[in-house]
Image (spheres, rainbow, N blue to C red):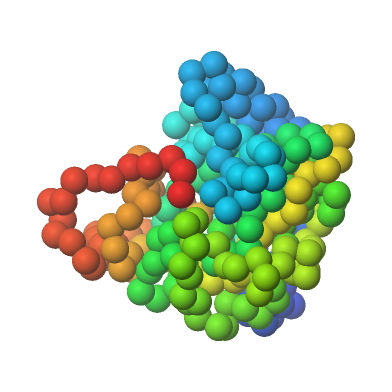
Amino acid sequence: MATSGLTAEQKRFYDENGFVVCQGLLTAREAQALRQEVHELAERLAKFRDINAAWATIQHTKTVVQHCHDVQFYSAAFSRLIVDPRFTAVAASIIGPNVQLHHTKMFIKPPEKGAPFPMHQDYPYFPHQRHTMIAAIFHFDDAPVERGCVRFVPGSHKLGPIPVSTPDSSLPPDQYPIDKAVPCPANAGDVVFFNYLTIHGSGINASLEARTTLLVQMRDPTDPPLKRTHESRGQGMMLAGVDASCCTTKALDVPAEAPLVTGNKR
Ligand SMILES: O=C(O)CCC(=O)C(=O)O
């Protein structure tokens, strides 16, 4: 995998579909080491608190997804990963040369009972003015369909924000069934990039192996949030380029002196 970002063909695919897979961005050995970091972190955290983050609208399925936000505050391996030039070059191909961190979160979908993610856009959780926000999902083990790989509605980023009224801001499953979305199976070391307007979700992990990922959310530093929400400790760190605006990312809805709101789950 080169450090020069997306090829012209990959960029065309991204622009058309709202997502793109970068195969082999990490080596199998790197992915294996990071998988271990994630699992060790989950074990440490689980001694102190409940780390299940299954969404409100799928609680009835009795499935589980282990989760932690801002993982770079728990292990330096993740700090190194999010500024890796192989990664930031791809993010810069999509966002532009200046790439700012919004947040990170790790997920382990455990074997047999790994929770699905209902179909949703990321927009309602942290709306921004110019929609430069993207996510990247690092895969630290293989994620075939039966392990609950991520799924997309291709081209849905062109629809703009869709109004939602569910308790967790997911889209109604009768209109947006997970199994009708296009599966995006990935191997350990692959990274999937997508826009925060692209409708996505993922199925249950019914296999005998865990699905282990790290999601990194990023934006152009000159794209301001529409409201002060979903803030976190690592937010604002530059992953590539500069923040020449020196803080235009202040939320548009409240004065700067409002208290910092932090939260781990949606
Ligand atoms: O990891 C997945 O399957 C999807 C995660 C996701 O959509 C999210 O956290 O917004």
Residue extending farthest to the front is 60
Q: Residue at x 44, y 31 (%)?
A: 73
Considering depth in this image, is 82 or 228 the residue closer to the camera? Answer: 228
Vertical comparison of 212 with 144: above or below: above
Considering depth in this image, is 16 or 76 the residue closer to the camera? Answer: 16
Which percent across, then down, holds residue 54?
A: 59, 43
Q: Residue at x 24, y 60 (%)?
A: 250
Name the side, left or right, on which 115 lies relative to 184. left
Vertical comparison of 209 with 131: above or below: above
- Which quarter of the picture shows residue 89? bottom right
Q: Residue at x 56, y 59 (%)?
A: 135
Name the side, left or right, on which 167 lies relative to 215. left
Can residue 262 be seen at all in this image of the molecule? yes
Which percent across, then down, holds residue 79?
A: 51, 37
The N terminus, quarter of image = bottom right
Vertical comparison of 221 with 52: above or below: below
Which percent across, then down, holds residue 149?
A: 76, 53
Residue extending farthest to the top is 47
Vertical comparison of 110 with 25: above or below: above
Which percent across, then down, holds residue 235?
A: 37, 48
How many labels, in total?
A: 0
Q: Residue at x 55, y 62 (%)?
A: 170
Can residue 28 be seen at all in this image of the molecule? no
Name the side, left or right, on which 40 lies relative to 1. left
Considering depth in this image, is 262 or 41 the residue closer to the camera? Answer: 262
- Which quarter of the picture shows residue 60? top right
